[in-house]
């Protein structure tokens, strides 16, 4: 396993220590779990580039200004 050194302010370190104690794990294990959870969420989320590619040309058949006017006409 690789080791890293990070700088935390005292409040962050105290919070991590409390959370680790509550869960009955080491601080290192808590950080590993947090990274694993964060990574799984991020990897499941499409990238900005993917979103752009999927939505490219979405307004091709419609005038954006006309669309805005129709929406605003619905407002009371």
Image (spheres, helix red, strand yellow):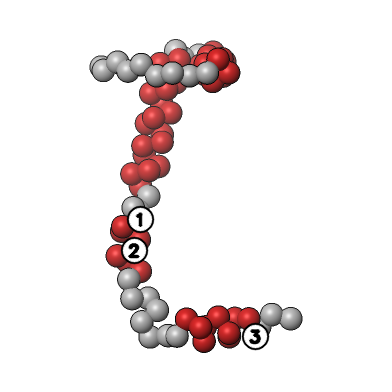
In the image, is 21 to the left or to the right of 59? right
Q: Residue at x 43, y 18 (%)?
A: 7
Which of the 4 image quadrants contains residue 48? bottom left
Mark 1: give few (<14), some (14-19) or many (20+) Cα within 10 Å: few
**Which quarter of the image is occupied by the C terminus?**
bottom right
Q: Residue at x 31, y 58 (%)?
A: 50
Q: Which residue is mark 3?
A: 73
**Which quarter of the image is occupied by the N terminus?**
top left
Distance in Å between CA atoms under marks 3 and 1: 32 Å
The reply to whether residue 12 is visible in this rendering is yes
Relative vertical location of residue 68 with respect to residue 25 in this rendering, above or below: below
Distance in Å between CA atoms under marks 2 and 3: 29 Å
Q: Dots 2 and 1: beta carbons under 8 Å? A: yes
**Sequence-wise first label, 2 or 3:** 2
The reply to whether residue 22 is visible in this rendering is no
In the image, is 3 to the left or to the right of 26? left
For label 1, the SS is helix
Distance in Å between CA atoms under marks 2 and 1: 6 Å
Q: Which residue is mark 2?
A: 52
Which of the 4 image quadrants contains residue 11? top right
For label 3, the SS is helix
Of 27 and 52, nearer the camera is 52
- Residue 8 coordinates in the image, percent (x, y): 48, 19
Q: Which residue is mark 1?
A: 48
Q: Dots 2 and 3: beta carbons under 8 Å? A: no
């Amino acid at each position: 396993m690789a080791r890293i050194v990070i700088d935390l302010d005292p409040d962050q370190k105290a919070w991590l220590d409390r959370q680790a104690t509550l869960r009955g794990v080491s601080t290192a294990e808590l950080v590993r779990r947090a990274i694993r959870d964060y990574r799984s969420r991020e990897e499941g989320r499409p990238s900005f580039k993917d979103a752009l590619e999927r939505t490219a040309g979405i307004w091709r058949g419609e005038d954006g200004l006309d669309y805005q006017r129709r929406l605003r006409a619905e407002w009371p």
